[in-house]
Image (cartoon, grey):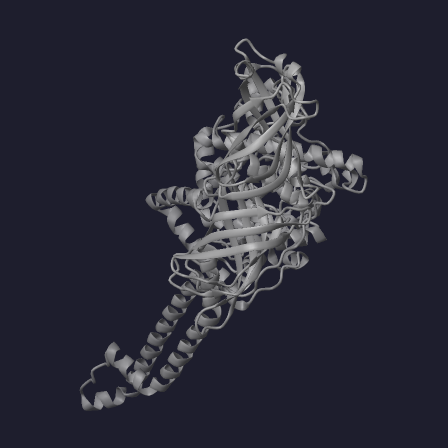
Amino acid sequence: MVPSSEKDIHDVWGYKYEWTDLHMTEEQQMPLRYSYDTLGEDVLVRVKDLQMKKAAENGEAAGKGAPRKTDLYESLKSIALTKEDPVVTKFWEDVHTVPEWVDWGQIKRGQDVFYRYGEAAMTGLAFSSLLGGMAAARIVETLARTGGFAPRVAWNRMLETTQFVLQVTNSLESVQPGGDGHVSAIRVRLLHAMVRNKILAMAKERDDYYSVEEFGTPINDLDSIGTISTFSAQLIWIALPAQGIYMRENEIEDYVALWRLVAYYMGTPTDVLETPASTKAIMESILDADLKPSNSSKVLAANIIQALADKAPTYPSADYLRAQARWLNGSRLSDALEIPKSSYLSVTLVMVQCIVICASSYIYRSIPILDRWKIEYMRKRLFYVLMEGKHGMKGKKTKFELQYIPGFNTVTEQGEVARGLSIGKAGSRDTRNLIILGVLIVILGFARMQSASRGDGSSSERKGGEVEQVEGRYEKKPTFGGKVKNHYKRFWWAHLIAFCAGFLIVALCLVYVAMPKIAQKGIDDATLSYTSLKFMKPSLDSLTLSVDAVQHSDSPFTPTLDAFNVSMHLVTDGITSEKVITQIGMPQIHAHHPDTNIVITDQKAAIVDIDQVTAFAKQVLVQESIEVRMEGKTKLHLGALPVNSVNYNSSITFKALNGLKGFNITEPKVNLMAAPGEPNLTGMALIPNPSVLTVELGKVMMHISTKEKGLIGNSTIDNFVLKPGQNLLPMNAIVDTSLALGSVDKQGMVNMIIVGQTAVYNGVHLTYYEAALQSHTLTLAVNLQSLLGSI
């Protein structure tokens, strides 16, 4: 045995370990900072090239409307199965070939390990692996440039990572080739290649954007190994032990094997993950070299706490989350990340949680029938709450597309977090742990009282021993009930004071702690729906809004909200944009049960970000439905209770124009005698509007073309106001009849392609509406032969 004085002990922010031959110095790690998944990179380029080629063949080239959005993985699959490209085919065969070292029985056991320690594992991944991992400044440079951990999107970003973890651990079929976990691993691999390409391209364009020499290639082999380590090694040897839980040797082997397989699918080097010892060594080597917190580290760590604070279903307070972060990462690293110290109560509650989870984990795993029940329960519960439930992803699983796009102006800023405990909310983790703490205190107090009573009894017996011997008889020992009665006779006043103090504390907590939480929960649970939404009198600076909406709440309370401003944000694929479309002044709202009508009439709303208005207009035009989020702050009044500040956050989904499906021209008339430059085709444009939207566009001009002859004319609709229901609007067109006749097929039909070009109101070109019109193509089959024959 080597004496401790001769061991090479390293200390990384309080985590101590022995350096061995398996460890790698920072210099030895350096080549891995510049190597990366070249096969994945080559496949990405080839798939995108083939996508563009097929889009061009389908008439979706630039200038003919926006290309149809395609699924990168599905394109990869299609190309691989048809063997169109040898590189893509090789990639597909590689990720569907199971390595010889894989033992499916061991992989299944590794998945069970995760759910055996379910709550502790989720806590460890959030606060040790993710938040603590933000101390790796070099890796954080890539994360900060994507904006994926900005305050508004961090929660969704964490849910997506959670989806990935749950998919690869859900079942054996899920992680086998073709399963959900296997597919997600490939999608993430392609996503990493896209982010890497984007950052490197931007670094070439601007030298100061990203330094490859300083930080290494974005998402390099070392980064990928580090990512796998955070899911496996860091959980085993840091996060779980911090909560008092130590895996058994066979559990460690199984869990490491599971994540080695995931690493293989993701194009990550697996040789350093071959054994538990080598996996632990590479984790410690990376921590030693890379755990150097920067300003970006502090921002992202704070944003993680903000994203988790007061979120359903457990509603943990920011103070409690900071206590958890400091407990799992230690004071030194937490101070370096500038995570504030929490209250003693929060620290105590975290300690109570660790004790309860630790004790239950050891009890459950020692009894086979309970162990199996817990594993299956946690597997189903976590998947339902986080993937299917209303507080999670609501069944909308991500496909790991490039949502958080690096940009020169993309900066991850630090958000603000509330202070205090989340006591009073149903299901609050703070409340649960406080109740457990209270029960423990009561039990300990009761035990102490019993011990004291027994001590008094023993003393009395000793003192009265001689008297008893003289009298020759024994007095009867007082019963427990008698002891309690005597205790309350002597100390009734102390219990009265304690009761009054307790009652006062509960009342104050209810009024000043619980009621604000209850009020906020009532606002969060309320839903808002539009019955009418009008955008009139458009300009480049503003729109005139009229809104009829209904707010529904199941709460029995009927508070009053002060008038306040809300910002409207566009939600795309579940991600709320940080940028604001416009701001709306909400009137004072006195809630009724269960529905409250809200009316806004002819309010001039300033356009805050014209790019967001453009994106909103595009989605309204082409999508079947659209989602926006309204955010603001106001004061809530309820009877004589103190006024509470609340955040108004409401997501609203409503029907959009669905690509103007059903568009047609009725009552068409051709005038062959029209003078040059005068309309020679008139009719009524039938435009269905399945939404509650009314939109005023002014004078709209559209290009008319055919596949055979290209542009053949243009059409105009004056005073274009689109209302809910079927719209019949007068339309006139100038069409080159010779070109139109040259496009007639054997049945006498002309397939017209109609693309909007301009929208002019009061002489001003409305660029946001024009961009939307230009992005969408309408097709209309016209029986020109029959039309000309009727003249």
Does the rendering let one see residue 272? no
Of residue 174 and residue 525, the one placed in the foreground of this image is 525
Q: Quadrant of residue 156?
A: top right
Position of 343 with respect to 614 (left or right) is: left
- Say if 385 sits above or below 469 in the image: above
Q: Residue furthest top?
A: 746
Q: Residue furthest left?
A: 473
Of residue 30 and residue 526, the one placed in the foreground of this image is 526
Of residue 436 and residue 257, the one placed in the foreground of this image is 436
Does the rendering let one see residue 275? yes
Of residue 547 and residue 299, the one placed in the foreground of this image is 547
> Which quarter of the image is occupied by the C terminus?
top right
Q: Quadrant of residue 780?
A: top right
Q: Which residue: 23% across, 81% down?
A: 477
Q: Which residue: 61% across, 21% down?
A: 671
- Residue 706: x and y in percent read 62, 18
- Residue 722: x and y in percent read 54, 39
- Say if 75 sits above or below 472 in the image: above
- Residue 599: x and y in percent read 49, 56
- Residue 30: x and y in percent read 74, 37
Number of callouts in the render? 0
